[in-house]
Image: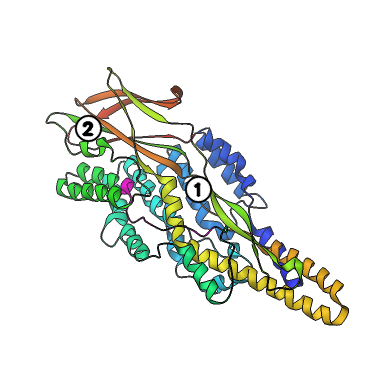
């Protein structure tokens, strides 16, 4: 039991509570990104950094995203590239870290990043390059996702043949060894994600910007395939504006707008129970499990309208529900997480049971039951759901566009909530050129 108590203090002291990020969250929610960065740096430089060494991926990912929103594109690229490097490095780490996670909890491991984080790193880094005036660099970055040996292809192979219900498989494995699991425990869902419409859309734009129309056409086919093959994600129609980018009348120039709204879901700790009736001490018959669950942070914004100086207007259309992508890809590893958590809790309770049995023989049933109760509390204290993930990815990506005469325009983007404009962004002297990529990025994370 002493070991369990020590592990409890260790794992609790290493974890950062979600409330520690509140002042950063508040700044981001108000679109005060420079303030968010300053607050993050100040908290990270304090005696108790909000991103411990094991969470280095998240430090560079979150900081890189905020720098992108703030317009610090070169700083953002450096930090996002470091996050990507650490994610790749995590795959080569020793299995000893995984062994420790079976003893205490998953927070003992270095955070390796989620699949969705690895995808969106390249999306935002591609936009960094474009905004810094490097279209070729943007295309190189997006190819890391879209090429035949890229990350999207690797994800397709990773998820191919995945059990239709990972949770049900885990239940079956536990039944084989005589363990009955409470069906109300979260058990994950089927995984159906192998393509990103957002990545493919940017790929089409960048190829067109380079004058590579055949490559753009192939990528547009992949964009349509993403909608067709991922029905859990793309419940919305394929945006008309996505097809229109390939059909610009002669003499006209295409203005494209991409918008990001809201904050992505975050993981929170869920506490669940299941019965261990095979232990004959009452305290050990009701086991406690702590598992991550996704909690949405809904945006107020339900419409985005773009107004061009001179009278033209158009609405942006939903391209990708990024929050849905996050939940879907997370399911790919939930079965293993569920099984590991269940097995770890069972082993801790078994250790408590063995200790109580020894005490029962020496000092009697009362002492044994008190020991079992104390050991259960110690075991439960060492359990801590791994709720680590990026806090500052957007929730949704929208796109739209219009064909204009080449020239310089003032553009206003209005963000609506229930019919009322709740925010407005203005872009002055936007130069819209013929036979070139003209892309405005607008962000409101309310």
Q: From the viewer's perspective, is residue 357 above or below residue 231?
A: below
Q: Residues within 10 Å of mark 2 (few under 14, many from 20)?
A: many
Closer to us: 77 or 355: 355
Disc 1 designates what residue?
A: 62
Give the x, y percent position of residue 365.
84, 75
The reply, left or right, for residue 22 in relation to residue 157 is: right
| Quarter-of-image position of residue 235 | top left
Q: Residues within 10 Å of mark 1 (few under 14, many from 20)?
A: many
Closer to us: 339 or 39: 339
Quarter placement of the N terminus: bottom right
Disc 2 designates what residue?
A: 254
Give the x, y percent position of residue 210.
20, 45
Q: Earlier in the sequence, mark 1 or mark 2?
A: 1
Task: Identify the residue shown where x is 73% and y is 75%.
Answer: 353
Give the x, y percent position of residue 403.
21, 29
Q: From the viewer's perspective, is residue 128 above or below residue 381?
A: above
Q: CA distance from mark 1 to mark 2?
A: 32 Å
**Span colored in magenta:** 186-199
Is 56 magenta? The answer is no
Task: Identify the residue shown where x is 25% and y is 51%.
Answer: 225
Secondary structure mostly seen in the magenta stretch = loop
| Quarter-of-image position of residue 251 | top left
Give the x, y percent position of residue 77.
40, 49
Task: Identify the residue shown where x is 34% and y is 26%.
Answer: 306
Closer to us: 139 or 202: 202
| Quarter-of-image position of residue 402 | top left
């Amino acid at each position: 039991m002493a070991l369990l108590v020590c592990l409890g203090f260790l794992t609790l002291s290493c974890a950062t509570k979600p409330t520690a990020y509140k002042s950063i969250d508040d700044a981001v929610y108000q679109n005060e990104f420079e303030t968010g960065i300053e607050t993050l740096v100040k908290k990270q430089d304090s005696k108790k950094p909000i991103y411990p060494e094991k969470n280095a991926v998240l430090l560079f990912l979150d900081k890189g995203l905020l720098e992108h929103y703030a317009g610090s594109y070169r700083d953002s690229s450096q930090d996002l590239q470091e996050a990507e490097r650490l994610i790749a490095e995590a795959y080569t780490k020793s299995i000893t870290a995984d062994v420790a996670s079976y003893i205490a909890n998953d927070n003992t491991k270095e955070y390796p990043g989620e699949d969705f984080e690895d995808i969106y790193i390249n999306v935002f880094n591609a936009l960094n390059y474009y905004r810094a005036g490097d279209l070729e660099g943007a295309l190189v970055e997006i190819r890391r996702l879209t090429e035949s040996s890229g990350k999207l292809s690797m994800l397709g192979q990773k998820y191919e043949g995945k059990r239709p219900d990972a949770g049900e498989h885990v239940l079956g494995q536990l039944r084989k060894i005589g363990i009955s699991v409470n069906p109300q425990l979260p058990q994950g869902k089927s995984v159906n994600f192998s393509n990103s419409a957002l990545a493919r859309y940017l790929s089409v734009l960048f190829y067109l910007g380079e004058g590579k129309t055949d490559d753009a056409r192939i990528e547009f086919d992949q964009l349509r395939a993403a909608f067709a093959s991922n029905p859990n994600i793309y419940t919305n129609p394929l945006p008309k504006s996505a097809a229109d980018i390939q059909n610009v009348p002669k003499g006209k120039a295409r203005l494209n707008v991409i918008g990001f709204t809201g904050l992505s879901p975050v993981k929170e700790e869920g506490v669940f129970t299941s019965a261990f009736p095979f232990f004959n001490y009452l305290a050990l018959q009701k086991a406690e499990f702590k598992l991550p669950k996704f909690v949405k942070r809904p945006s107020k914004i339900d419409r985005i309208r773009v107004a061009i100086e001179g009278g033209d207007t158009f609405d942006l259309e939903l391209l990708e529900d990024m929050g849905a992508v996050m939940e879907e890809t997370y399911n790919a590893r939930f079965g293993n997480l569920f099984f590991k958590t269940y097995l770890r809790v069972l082993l801790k309770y078994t250790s408590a049971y063995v200790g109580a049995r020894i005490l029962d023989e020496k000092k009697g049933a009362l002492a044994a039951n008190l020991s079992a109760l104390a050991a259960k509390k110690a075991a439960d204290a060492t359990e801590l759901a791994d709720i680590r993930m990026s806090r500052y990815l957007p929730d949704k990506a929208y796109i739209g566009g219009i064909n204009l005469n080449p020239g310089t325009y003032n553009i206003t983007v209005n963000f609506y909530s229930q019919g009322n404009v709740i925010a407005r962004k203005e872009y002055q002297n936007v130069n819209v050129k013929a036979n070139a990529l003209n892309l405005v990025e607008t962000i409101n994370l309310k």
